[in-house]
Amino acid sequence: MKMVSKSGLATMVLIFVFLHVPNVIASEESVSSTEIKIPVDSVTIYGNDMAFVKRDTTVELDRSLLEIRVLNFTKPILDSLFIYDNKGSLFGWHHIVKKETVQEYVNKTLDFDTILKNSLGSEIEINTYSNRSIQGELTWIDIGRIGILGDDGVLFINRADIRDIFIYGAKTKETQEVNKTSSIPELVFKERSEKGNHNIKISYLTWGANWKTDYKFYTDSDEKTGKGILQAWSIITNDVGENWNDVQMKLVVGYPLVLYPRAIPTPIRMDYVYKGMAMEEVSFAAPQIEERFVAESVGEYCVYELKDRITLKKGETRYFPIVSNEVEFKKRYLWDTRNGETTYKIYEIENTLDNPWADGIFSVYVRDNFQGQDKIRYTTKKDKAEIKTSKAPDIVVKKTILETETFPEYTETYRGRTRYARTTYYKVNLTMENHRDEGIDLRIKDHMTSGHQVELKSSTLEPRRILNTLTWDITMLEGDEKTIIYDYEVTNWRYL
């Protein structure tokens, strides 16, 4: 038998204690649970069957690590969910749908055979097709016949011969117990709560709400010119699956860009000046979060490791915070002529944090109002991400080809070989009009026709050139109009 020294025994004891320390710590920080209801406070409906919903409530909570269950919470578009608690730091959240079975009592109408069986022993009157009337006690029932007890015994009658039946006191309905299963959607989030009154705000995007406009024009003139009254009526539809009681309603002409898997209808083009939805000057803080990951550089990668273990059930999705820090942004507008006559609002944000940003969806909110979202690429430190949030129809742009001419083909010798060359000349006009109530910075990108040799001849404003793409950055005042005219030649060769 091998003996263990005292020092070895002490080492084993220390290891045993060390291995059990996490369990002791975990048990000290227990999680309590509470259920609350958060009513819908406001709804902003966009022109693509989508709504931005805000919920708001004030509730008294204790100081603890708390799991909050929001009852009857209709499923949102999950990636858009925003939770804010002025006295709580979020740990994570998930959405579930509970199945609840309850017993209910319903009145069910009975079929004819059941009524007959339940009426055994009752007084009955029968009229046959041969105009015979029979009265007595219903005493026997078969598939094809019934029996009636009279003074002289039981009379059996074919059911096919019966025209009418009258049963005294017959019950045509009965109360039955049924099990009814209902689905109860819940939002569940965990936070480190402070004691006191908590102001909890939740906002998210959801499908199923839409609105449209019904225009009515009234005039009393039948002349070529005249005056009249135009009325516009909004038609609002709520198909999101929940009641909106005493909510603030907002309707938006147009819609933000989103990346959720649902078809967005192409809006009808209207020739009018678009004015954005007015936003009140309010102060709104970002939600407090607790960073749940540790970042580490491994080779070419930045690895985020969750600090604690989690359980992720089948079909379940959860969200946890990674980092919270301050960054700077620049706002400008972009017209890329490959998108036709459409300009976009762009937010440019530099990654000044300690780690790169992974590919993902980037949403922008301004004063608690959703602006739009875009997908960003992997962004290294000191690099910049550009987020395209919405169209800007009040910046009117147009590209026009003023001239195009193809010169006759000619031959030339190049490195001892004969080749045929053909050159085409282009003259392009770009016009920009700013109908916004503010000055803007506008980036313009245009693309010259490809060829073996593309030569920019001249431009009224000097561009930056990368390959065949030309870029101009201009500043436009409110109501400003500007024009850029440039020309270039494209030459292509073919060898003998």
Image (spheres, grey):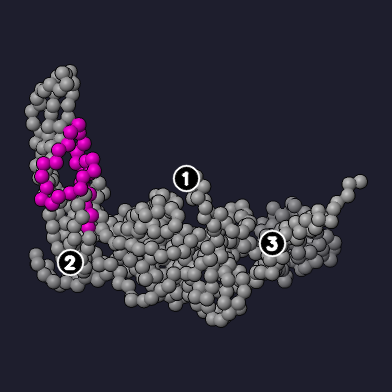
Q: Which one is earlier in the sequence, the residue at label 1 or at label 3?
A: 3
Percent x, y of residue 158: 74, 53
In this orientation, does residue 206 appear? Answer: no
Residue matched to label 3? 22
Number of on-image labels: 3
Q: Main secondary structure of the magenta part?
A: strand
User: For the residue carrying disc 2, how many other residues have a C-alpha within 10 Å: few (<14), some (14-19), or many (20+)?
Assistant: few
The one of 5 and 104 positioned closer to us in this rendering: 5
Spatial distance from mark 2 to mark 3, Cα to Cα? 63 Å
On residue 300, the disc is: 1
In this orientation, does residue 96 appear? Answer: yes
The one of 117 and 23 positioned closer to us in this rendering: 23
Q: Is residue 462 magenta?
A: yes
Percent x, y of residue 321: 51, 61
Residues drawn in magenta: 442-470
Residue matched to label 2? 478
Disc 1 to disc 3: CB gap under 8 Å:
no
Percent x, y of residue 48: 36, 59
What residue appears at the point 41 percent right and 65 percent down from the top-left corner?
Answer: 326
Percent x, y of residue 223: 9, 67
